[in-house]
Image (tube, rainbow, N blue to C red):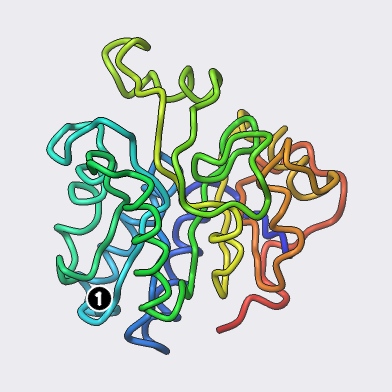
Amino acid sequence: MEVIIKENYEELSKFAAQFITDQINNKPDTVLGLATGSTPLGTYKELINLHKENKVDFSQVASFNLDEYVGLPKEHSQSYYYFMNENFFKHINIKPENWYLPDGMAKDIPQSCEEYEKKIKEYGGIDIQILGIGGNGHIAFNEPGSSLASRTRVKTLDEKTISDNSRFFDSIDEVPRYAITMGIGTIMEAKIIILLANGENKADAIVKTAEGPITSMVPASIVQLHPRATIIVDKAAASKLTREYSSEPAKLNL
């Protein structure tokens, strides 16, 4: 695991987008693992700009999203399907048949979760997994206490997660209480992991993730065990780290 500290969110986003671009240019059929939420938005915007400048081609790329709310139809403005289409997919040349999200409206959700795992394997696994991190240390919707070997499944959302996500809804009562999420075991099978965080509100989670013990109570701490995981943060999110870290990678390579 490596930690890279950037000056601000803009630099963080540009760095992450350039690394993903280099990966795709090196392997045009890259399989991306994508996250939703505010943190990766800057990275997606930078990737869109790079695509418009003809510096990256998504025509052979496939993608799998980490999670989706249970009970929200695709057209709902707060579904992650809608989020990804509005903020990324419709602005690049990825083929619609090559991007996948968990189906929160499936009639048989456990079966759909098994099929999602099989589909990832059919593509040969995820090459680069982008992660955000919750204030309580969750990754995807793997809340504190989640099994570190878990697979794609339904999770009950933590009250802090519901509170954090309520800013996207008209009221906290509208926030779904359940979500489908890739499991921690699934995430850890990605060849490369990039965990992004910005802002002082993520500082506690980052120091526990990077410098604390590996524990299911801080699910993100598992990335310490990944051979090619990099935590990329701005100075605000890094404010509680106690060790020395660089602003450039020592071993982040394709």
Q: Residue at x 58, y 55 (%)?
A: 195
Q: Is residue 219 above or below residue 126?
A: above
Q: Residue at x 38, y 53 (%)?
A: 113
- Residue 181: x and y in percent read 45, 46
Q: How many marks?
A: 1
Q: Residue at x 44, y 39 (%)?
A: 154
Q: Residue at x 55, y 60 (%)?
A: 187
Which residue is label 1 attached to? 58
> As rendered, which of 104 and 173 lies closer to the eye?
104
> As rendered, which of 63 and 26 lies closer to the eye?
63
Q: Is residue 37 left or right of residue 9?
A: left
- Residue 253: x and y in percent read 60, 81
Tell me which corner region of the image, top left, top right, bottom left or bottom right, holds residue 44: bottom left
Q: Quadrant of the C terminus?
A: bottom right
Q: Is residue 55 left or right of residue 207?
A: left
Q: Quadrant of the N terminus?
A: bottom right
For disc 1, the neighbor class at 10 Å (few under 14, some 14 to 19, many from 20) is: some
Q: Is residue 43 left or right of residue 156?
A: left
Tell me which corner region of the image, top left, top right, bottom left or bottom right, holds residue 173: top left
Q: Amino acid at mark 1?
A: Phe
> As rendered, which of 53 and 141 lies closer to the eye?
141
Q: Is residue 139 above or below residue 56?
A: above
